[in-house]
Image (tube, rainbow, N blue to C red):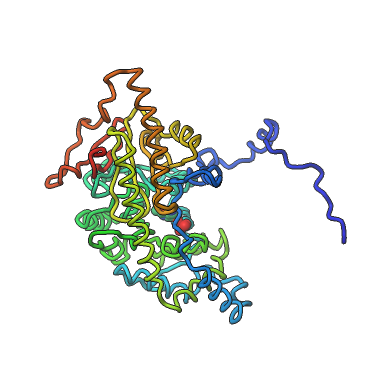
Amino acid sequence: MTEVPQPPHKRRAHTSTRDLERYAGLFAERTTVMRSSAMRDLMAVTARPEVISLAGGLPDTSTFPPERLAAQMSKIAAQSTAAALQYGPTEGFDETKDCIVEVMAAEGMLPDPDDIVVTTGGQQAIDLVTKTLVDPGDVVICEAPTYPGAVPVFCSYQADVRQVEMDGDGMRIDLLEALLAELKAEGRRPKFIYTVPSFQNPGGVTLSLERRARLVEIARRHEILVVEDNPYGMLRYEGEALPPLYQLDGGDFVIYLGTFSKILSPGIRLGWVVAPPPVLEKVVLGKGATDLCTSTLTQFFVRQYFAEGGWKRYVEDLVDLYRGRRDTMLAALAEHFPAEATWTEPEGGLFIWATLPEYIDTGDLLAKALRSDVAFVPGQAAYVDGRGKNSMRLNFSGVDDEEIREGIGRIGRVIREQVELYEALAPGSSSGAPGREAEGVTADAGREAEDVPVEDVAGNVVPLRKEANG
Ligand code: PMP
């Protein structure tokens, strides 16, 4: 055997100051505003088997029958090895687009396959749309809190991100209109409004039908693009399905982002963008520059999987499983979180958003929680401006009932320690979340008492579907 030449020295585990200086002068300006993804950071820690992670947004892929995967992969190998191992078209295979049309039809949408580009996950879809539309300093509007994975994307493209508060019915359209008026007065036109209208990540809330109609009407009136990110629409555990914005708009002003991650597998890295042809053309150019094409092999897998039928049955099984886990988490929260805490009660999706008294910093709390081998996403990751410090995102899909109970129990203990410490240091001052009665916060007319939006001291309006525990 020929000897493999060894590199002259091993890469150092830590970069020296001299190294940093040498490279820093070469960095693009945008690297100064790049942020890491909170979930990625946490994944390194949560990979330890003893850690119960309520941090990731992981679907339970253990429910997919191994023999089914094996059978489909064998078929691909027998019938199409060469093609499946080859490059494919940048915009994706027609057969993949047919599967996407089927998925979107299940939620009431009828896209033209020519308006679809297959992407490497929904994450790339967010990146490509932002790459296509945003120059440094351009305004992007999104929810407060927003999808933590979108924050590093918007920051990389140096967007001026404006976050609009939510309540139990999703984004506050009255506040959106006020922001649009403010921007107009400054002569600025937002590039797009990014929203996760159904079972929002991280808030767990859903944009009401009335607000969906208003948002689409605003987009059309002001000619502003709305980017609808909908990974969770089909994971509804109760209540009536609501029409996606794309369906209400017909695809003129709504760009739609989808993914197979939550209805099949995130490991296959398959998502998509549906956009009007002029936008799509640029998205395809951007994608070509990024990765030439999405994995051919996994597109073959999806084609095969859909051809066999039964994909909806698998989604129904996931819905049953996650509904139970959501209920377990809600019960555990009521049992273990202190009276000062509040949280959302999602009708679907994978996340619960909890808000703690404002004197608790969930970044610090996470360090303590990790010592108890449990993790969550600190709320700050869902804001661009440092807000959200006293909130957290909790995932209920990736671990089983027992781990949910144990994990929430452990987090509850660290929170209670903090509350007790605070009370010992400042007796009588921890009477719930002090910001609840913050000025300017009003309940929407007709809203039930338990659905009242409240503002915490950090200024976050959070949907209170539940008044503390008990
Ligand atoms: N958008 C939202 C709102 C998400 O929650 C996620 C994943 N958690 C994504 C996009 C990206 O998912 P993927 O790249 O796996 O499709």
Q: Above or below — where is 237 with respect to 462?
A: below
Q: Is residue 193 visible?
A: no
Q: Hey, which residue is sitting farthest right in the picture?
A: 2
| Residue 255 left/right relative to 283 | left
Q: Position of residue 252 (x, y in %)?
A: 31, 64
Q: Where is the N terminus found, in terms of image quarters?
A: bottom right
Q: Quadrant of residue 10?
A: top right
User: Which residue is painted at 29% across and 60% down in the image?
Assistant: 245
User: Which residue is painted at 40% across and 62% down in the image?
Assistant: 258
Q: Hey, which residue is sitting farthest bottom in the picture?
A: 79
| Residue 365 left/right relative to 222 | right
User: Which residue is painted at 43% across and 42% down in the image?
Assistant: 377
- In-front residue for pair 172/67: 67
Q: Is residue 356 visible?
A: yes
Q: Where is the C terminus found, in terms of image quarters?
A: top left
User: Which residue is painted at 44% across and 52% down in the image?
Assistant: 399
Image quadrant of ligand 1? Answer: bottom left
Q: Position of residue 321 (x, y in %)?
A: 37, 60
Q: Hey, which residue is sitting farthest left in the picture?
A: 446
